[in-house]
Image (spheres, rainbow, N blue to C red):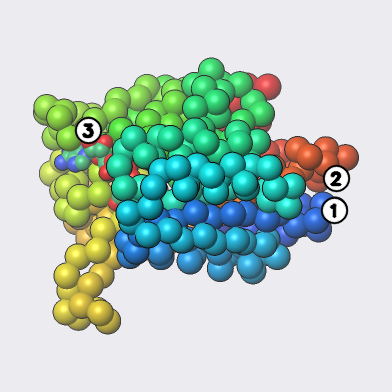
Amino acid sequence: MVAELLDGKRVAAEILEGLRRRIACLPHPPCIAFLRIGENAASRFYVGRKVAVAKDLGIRSIVEVFPEQVAEKTILEQLSRWNSDGEIDGILVQAPLPSREFQRSAFAAVDPAKDVDGFHPYNFGLLAQERPGGFIPCTPKGILRLLEAYAIPTDGRHAVIVGRSLIVGRPLSLLLQSHGANATVTVCHSRSQQLRSIVRSADILISAAGQPNLILEDMVAEGTTVVDVGQNSVPDETFPGGHRLCGDVDFPALRHRCSHLTPVPGGVGPMTVAMLMENAVEAVERKFPGNRRNDPPIEQKCFPS
Ligand code: NAD
């Protein structure tokens, strides 16, 4: 068996083309404000990528970078200014922040109507209650869209998620167990026992642990769909800069064991960025409902109407 690759780059490109048409119907393109703290290489890369894709779509970006030692008050004041700025449609606070508590305060300080990353407790509550009108976090939303694009059924199947973060694992578990997806969901984390046997029982495995080679060939049953969210930089002298990007799974070995597999890069990453753009377009469409194109937003696909 050779796994079919879930080509996030291709699916994301199709989604972005649809967004171009939606943006053309709006009185103005969206404007996203990005806030980044410190010089973490991954954060710099993620924000840079999002800004580049936004630019290509005609979406305006504002980027504010603060030093690692910035006071929480300074960040909350910046977010408050953006909340009341009518020119800004979406706000994204790039994770990770200096501490988990800092991150929670910053996420909660974003106006829920501009929370295009979907991490505000209000939007998280809407997701948990399967109520429309919020924003769904981009990576989980992108994973659902990728499964949909390849017609991979979730209904009644066992989805195992490795990782319980606020950014990926936790919201993904809510989406997958919703009445739109109907999966039976197990969430594992760093304190889980029997990871191997739980992973082996998965029909759909989503690994978001950030640990290279965590998921090995003998842990995965034949025919499993494997979604690798991990983005890990590992030393490799054969690559420019002496590092290469890899996911959490042993890709070459699993390629001959799974039914479907996401590559890293080119799988979940581009879907995350496309979903951010979609949420930003959605934010403007909510302000101008008369200018909304009739492409159904994701909420209608994931949740019952
Ligand atoms: P995080 O560090 O906040 O969470 C990691 C989770 O994995 C935790 O819940 C932890 O308990 C669990 N975990 C860690 N080691 C484990 C182990 N050995 N066994 C079982 N569980 C374990 O990270 P995050 O923000 O959720 O990101 C996870 C990974 O996904 C990272 O590599 C990150 O770069 C990547 N990521 C990719 C995208 C994308 O668009 N492709 C988006 C977000 C995050």
Which residue is disc 1 drawn over?
A: 27
Separation of residues labelled 2 and 3 (CA atoms) = 43 Å
Image coordinates of residue 32 in percent, x first then y, are: 62, 54
Separation of residues labelled 1 and 3 (CA atoms) = 45 Å
Seen from the viewer's position, the closer of residues 222 and 15 is 15
Image coordinates of residue 54 in percent, x first then y, are: 61, 62
Outermost residue to the right: 290
Whether residue 126 appears in this view of the structure is yes
Q: In the rendered image of this protein, does residue 124 appear above or below residue 81? A: above
Whether residue 8 appears in this view of the structure is no
Q: Nearer the viewer, mark 1 or mark 2?
A: 1
Q: Secondary structure at mark 2?
A: helix
Q: Amino acid at mark 2?
A: Asn
Seen from the viewer's position, the closer of residues 29 and 274 is 29
Tell whether 127 sits left or right of 223. Answer: right
Q: In the rendered image of this protein, does residue 28 appear above or below residue 196? A: below
- Contact between labelled residues 2 and 1, with CB atoms less than 8 Å apart: yes
Seen from the viewer's position, the closer of residues 124 and 159 is 124
Mark linked to residue 301: none
Dot placed on the residue nearer the N-terminal end, 1 or 3: 1
Dot placed on the residue nearer the N-terminal end, 2 or 3: 3
Badge 1 crowding class, 10 Å Cα cut-off, few under 14, some 14 to 19, many 20 or more, is few
Which residue is disc 2 drawn over?
A: 291
Dot placed on the residue nearer the N-terminal end, 1 or 2: 1
Q: In the rendered image of this protein, does residue 151 appear above or below residue 31? A: above
Separation of residues labelled 1 and 2 (CA atoms) = 8 Å
Mark linked to residue 189: 3
Q: Nearer the viewer, mark 1 or mark 3?
A: 1
Q: Amino acid at mark 1?
A: Pro
Q: Amino acid at mark 3?
A: His
Tell whether 29 sits left or right of 233. Answer: right
